[in-house]
Each structure stands twice: as C-alpha cells, then as structure tokens.
Image (cartoon, rainbow, N blue to C red):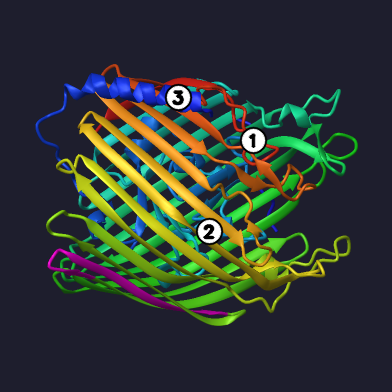
C-alpha cells in the first residue's frame, strides 16, 4: 500500500439573541427609506432534486441552496461553517477547523447522507461507516451547495437514506481573470487562495489553489484537564488544488473534466487511560484526497435529447499516528479507500414540460488497510419522469434498481408532486420515497482480533427507510416576503448495530425521525435581506425507546445581509442549537444531557477599488464557551481580516 504523503510543512444566551435582534431592527430601520417601489424576484434554479436544472417553484422536494455569493459575503472558509445555518442539519465538529465533522440530516445517521462533489461520490469507503468527513473541505472554489432532504435512493442509490448534499465547483467564464486572497487572525490563522479562470462557449477553464492554517485552537474544556498537565491546542494545515475544464467539439459534442486534490494534517490532544483524559501530547492525522471525473456530453437535438457518458475516480488515504510512552509518534495506522464509477445518463424531452430521464451505472469500491484488502461492486439502472401541467401542477417520479455483489438486488423509488394555487400563488408540496444504505466494506469484512474479538459480517443486509414530507410555501407582499413549513417523517429498519454478544454487526436496529422545518425570508429592499429558519427534530431509537445521540430537538438561525452602498457589504448570522443527548469525551458515560448555545458571527467587506477589497469578520462574537460535541470546545471569539485582489475579467 502506498504511504500517505505528509501535509507540506510550508510556511447563547437570550441576551445574545436580543442583541442581534436589536442590531437587525436598527439595520432594517436605516434601510427602509431605501426600499424601491417594487421588488424583482428571480426564481432560483435547483439541480439535485431531479438531476436537471429546474426552477425552484416547480420542485416539491425540500432543497436549500447555498451560493458562492452567500459563502463569500459571510466569509465561511470551510464546508462545516457554510452548512451551519441550513435547516434540517446538525453539524458536529470535534474542535474547530480540520476536526472530524459529521452532519446529521433530519435526524438520520451521519452516514445516511450522500455527498457529491461535481457528481463524484465523496463518501469514504475506508471508514467504518462510509461517511464523509466534512471538516476536510475548503470553500474557495465552491459555486453552490444544494442540500436535498429526505430519502433519495430512487435517483441516487445507496447511502442517500437521509438525503444528498451536492457540491458544484466554479466554472470559468468571460475574459481571463486572476484572483488572490490573504487572511490572518485569531487561533493562529493564516489563509491564502489564488485562482485563474475564464472561458466562452467553446472552451472554459478554472484553476484554484487554497491554503488554510490554524495552529492554536483550544479544544479541551478546562474541567477535563488533569492537574499539572498543559494541554496543547489543535493545529490544522491543509492545501487544496482544483481544476475544471470544458471544450466543445463542434455543436453537438462537449468534453468536461474536473479534478481536485487535498493534502492536510491535523494535530489534536492525545487522550490516554480509562476513563481517558487529555495529555500534554498530540496525535497526528494525515490525509490525502483525490477526486476526478471526465465526461462526454452528446446533444444532437439542441437540448431535446442529451446523453452523458462519464467516468469518476476517488482515492482517500488516511494515516493516524499516536504518541508512544516515550513521547514520540508511533507507527502509522493507514487506511486507503478507492471508488471507480462508470455511468450513462440520458435526458429526453417528450414534449414541452415533460422530460424522461434514464441512466445506467457501475461502480466498484475498495478498502486497503495494514491487515486487509477487500472490494465490492454494484450495478444500477434508474428511470425518472418530470412533468409540468399547465404551469400549475408539477411532479417528479423515479424508480431505481441496484444489484450489489454482496447482498443482491434492491429497488427504491420516490414521487414528489407540487401544486401552485392560482389565486394566492401558494405552493403545496409533498413527497414520499424509499432509501437504503449498503453495508460498508468495514462492516462486511474487517476483523478486529485478537485484541478485541470483533468480526465483520459478510451476511449483512442494507439498512432501509421510508420517508414522507408535506408542506407549503407562501409568497406575500408582492413576493418580498416568503414563508413556509414542511412536516417530515422517516422510518428506518434493519439498522446495522453491534449484536447482543458484542462480537459482530447485525441488522437489528430500528429508528424513527420526525419534525418540522419552517422559514421566513424578507427582502426589505434589494440592499437589505433577512431570513430566519427553525427546525424541530425528534429522533428516537425504536428498539431502546430513547432519543438518538447528537440530534437536538430545536435549531434556529437568522441571517441579515445589507449593502448600504455599492462598495460596502455587511452580514450578521445567529445560530441557536438546543440541548441534546450525547456521550462524554471518551464515551465512558454513554448518555448525558448536553447544553445548547447561541453563537453570533459578523462579517464586512469594502471594495476599496475595482481591483482591491478589504474584509474582516468576527466569529463567536460573545465568546461563548460551548462543547459540540461534548468534550470538544467550539472555537472561542475570533477576529480575522484580509485583502482580496482581482485582475482581468
């Protein structure tokens, strides 16, 4: 097995909510005088719900779109930060930038979320539960993030039991343009990024390189530090490289290619003993991730019949090193996960507003550790219909069959209708779908022996779910105000858990998650926009009759964006996460009540010239000391500032 390259050593309280509410009110009052006579609303485009670009008003599924503009305005540098305000998600990160990060969608498990980067599945085959570590991804080259909630296996196959997070990177357009940014601030932060892009109808290109360093993030609560021990902070250092190319070979054929590589290291306090306690030593985690995809697009009928032939490859290499009794780092524990995928997808316009989509896929994933090499394959076919009747009734329906080398065949489906009431423009929407998660290579084949006497189970079956949601969206005040709510429920069977003897895995678990997502968005003027989201989630283990871990019942967020003058942009974000059930730092206490918190972030940027922008932000404005998860502090008060330069374009 090839060795992992080392990361380069190159250079809330109520008062918090009240304070932000007062700030929002003052901003609103100051800007109301600027409000024009009428607002201009442009319908947002959604791709992930059906696989084809569709106006949001026609989509029944629950989708949140986070744009590059929003990420840049709020100065969110990592993927966990960009997802923090999305309804239906609970983001859990162990100790700030670079820490292992899980995302729980609508109360389902973190490995029930399928993650796609430019169409490439990013879930890691080498991890025990095949989840994606969101903490390893930077946001500098992201064009948009779509968070699609609810069972989506009818279109996306395995591991989309809870939903899909689809990330699209930036595509070059227009005259050649070079950009650069440098930023420094609290917690030993020093970040840089540079990009070069451009393109036209025949050829487009985009290249980006990013570096993020944060070498003094305190993550251990003071109450856990043993007397006389000096615990060192977390240190994160990562480089990310990405490229995207497209070329048209005549009027009917186009070639596209994307590639990205991330090389990083994360040092964190090492725990020892039982119950374990932090020591003055640090463990080292290195990782290298590579993703690439090439595709041929054939469009002989000017968009009415489009075929895409693609091949994707991902490689995720992880190495963990713990300190020895002598204080130096021991031998690494290495894990390699690979996935190759071949796919064809065809979109056929039957008539205006009626599209039939079909696809074929083959993928094979592989795990390699110091003691085991194993692989597994899957073949799939799917069919989807998307219809628009009288521009009032919309429906998307799909069905898919997967055949896995280990457990055989599995069929899933989804239907999602929506109706626009003519008199009020009320959107009524609903969906019902099924999902499944395939057993991981680790669950099937990895044996932990002789020390742990724990074995993989090659006879495992997929976890299965049934889920529905129903809701409405209502435009008011000439579409300046949008409100809506969605009620959801998921029933999950055959959950893979440790068997009663504690020696292997078995399909014996059951869970139910249900709740509501609600939002209100107000455009006071084109310069001033407010949005609030609230999520209630009740997630229960139906076998043990108790709440699932790390699923807070209540989550709320509010954002304000204000552009008082053309050159100045301001934003404020408040995030409230309610109490939840968790284990302690080493899970020697299996269940305890974790406290909630309110965090406030501010950001501002000023365009000094057409080429130079000055920016700054404050995270955790009130320096809230909060553990999420229990035993790991979120970063405290942080202030950051920097410069952006753009040339060309």
In what element is the residue under mark 1? loop
Rendered-image quadrant of the N terminus: bottom right
In this view, the residue in front, 604 or 541, is: 541
Q: Is residue 35 above or below residue 308?
A: above
The image shows residue 557 at horizontal and vertical percentages of: 43, 38
Q: Are marks 3 and 1 in contact (CB under 8 Å)?
A: no
Q: Residues within 10 Å of mark 2 (few under 14, many from 20)?
A: many
Image position of 312 (left or right of 547): left
Which comes before the other along the chain, label 3 or label 1? Answer: 3
Image position of 519 (left or right of 157): left
Which comes before the other along the chain, label 1 or label 2? Answer: 2
Rendered-image quadrant of the C terminus: top left
Q: Is residue 253 visible?
A: yes
In what element is the residue under mark 3? strand
* Residue at (45, 40) in percent of width and height: 556
Q: Is residue 50 visible?
A: no
**Magenta segment range?**
387-404
In this view, the residue in front, 126 or 521, is: 521
Q: Nearer the viewer, mark 3 or mark 1?
A: 1
Task: Return the residue at label 1.
Answer: 627
> What secondary structure predominates along the stretch shown in magenta?
strand
The image shows residue 605 at horizontal and vertical percentages of: 35, 22
Disc sitting over residue 314 in the figure: 2
* Residue at (44, 41) in percent of width and height: 85
Q: Is residue 598 above or below residue 131?
A: above
The image shows residue 26 at horizontal and vertical percentages of: 31, 20
Task: Return the residue at label 3.
Answer: 182
Magenta-colored stretch includes residue 466? no
């Amino acid at each position: 097995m090839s060795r992992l390259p080392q990361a380069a050593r190159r250079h809330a309280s109520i008062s918090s909510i009240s304070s932000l509410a007062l700030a929002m009110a003052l901003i609103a009052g100051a800007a109301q005088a600027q409000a024009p006579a009428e607002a201009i609303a442009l319908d947002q485009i959604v791709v992930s719900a059906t696989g084809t670009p569709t106006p949001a008003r026609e989509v029944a599924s629950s989708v949140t779109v986070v744009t590059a503009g929003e990420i840049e305005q709020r100065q969110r540098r990592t993927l966990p930060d960009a997802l923090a305000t999305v309804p239906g998600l609970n983001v859990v990160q162990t100790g700030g930038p670079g820490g292992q990060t899980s995302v729980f969608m609508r109360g389902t498990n973190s490995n029930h979320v399928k993650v796609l980067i430019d169409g490439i599945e990013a879930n890691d085959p080498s991890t025990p539960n095949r989840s994606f570590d969101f903490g390893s991804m930077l946001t500098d080259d992201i064009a948009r993030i779509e968070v699609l909630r609810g069972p989506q296996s009818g279109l996306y196959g395995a591991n989309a039991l809870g939903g899909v997070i689809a990330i699209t990177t930036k595509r070059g357009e227009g005259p050649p343009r070079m950009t650069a940014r440098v930023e420094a601030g609290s917690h030993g932060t020093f970040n840089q990024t540079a990009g070069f892009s451009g393109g036209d109808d025949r050829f487009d290109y985009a290249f980006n390189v990013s570096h993020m360093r944060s070498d003094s993030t305190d993550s251990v609560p003071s109450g856990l530090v043993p007397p006389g021990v000096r615990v060192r902070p977390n240190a994160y250092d990562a480089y990310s490289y990405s490229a995207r190319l497209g070329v048209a070979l005549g009027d009917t054929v186009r070639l596209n290619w994307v590639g990205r590589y991330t090389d990083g290291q994360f040092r964190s306090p090492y725990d020892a003993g039982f119950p374990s306690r932090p020591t003055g030593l640090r463990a080292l985690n290195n990782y290298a991730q590579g993703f690439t995809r090439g595709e041929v697009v054939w469009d002989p009928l000017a968009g009415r019949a489009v075929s895409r032939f693609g091949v994707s490859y991902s490689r995720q290499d992880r190495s963990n090193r713990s300190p020895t009794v002598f204080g130096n780092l021991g031998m690494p524990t290495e894990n390699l996960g690979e996935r190759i995928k071949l796919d064809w997808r065809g979109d056929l316009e039957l008539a205006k507003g009626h599209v039939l989509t079909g696809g074929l896929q083959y993928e094979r994933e592989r795990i390699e550790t110091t003691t085991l090499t194993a692989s597994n394959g899957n073949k799939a076919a799917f069919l989807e219909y998307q219809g628009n009747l009288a521009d009032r009734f919309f429906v998307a329906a799909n069905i898919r069959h997967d055949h896995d080398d280990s457990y055989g065949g599995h069929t899933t489906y989804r239907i999602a209708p929506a109706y626009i009431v003519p008199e009020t423009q009320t959107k009524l929407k609903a969906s019902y779908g099924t999902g499944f998660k395939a057993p991981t290579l680790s669950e099937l084949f990895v044996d932990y022996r002789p020390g742990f006497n724990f074995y993989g189970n090659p006879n495992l079956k997929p976890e299965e779910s049934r889920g529905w949601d129903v809701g409405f969206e209502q435009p008011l005040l000439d579409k300046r105000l949008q409100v809506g709510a969605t009620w959801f429920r998921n029933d999950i069977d055959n959950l893979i858990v440790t068997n009663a003897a504690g020696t292997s895995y078995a399909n014996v678990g059951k869970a139910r998650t249900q709740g509501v997502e609600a939002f209100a968005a107000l455009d006071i003027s084109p310069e001033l926009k407010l949005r609030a989201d609230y999520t209630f989630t009740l997630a229960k283990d139906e076998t043990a009759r108790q709440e699932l871990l790390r699923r807070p019942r209540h989550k709320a967020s509010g954002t304000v964006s204000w552009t008082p003058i053309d050159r100045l942009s301001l934003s404020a974000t408040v995030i409230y996460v309610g109490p939840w059930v968790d284990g302690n730092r080493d899970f020697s206490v299996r269940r305890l009540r974790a406290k909630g918190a309110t965090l406030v972030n501010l950001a501002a940027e000023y365009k000094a010239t057409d080429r130079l922008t000055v920016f700054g932000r404050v995270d955790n404005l009130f320096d809230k000391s909060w553990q999420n998860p229990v035993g790991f502090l979120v970063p405290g008060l942080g202030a950051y500032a920097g410069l952006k330069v753009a040339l060309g374009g």
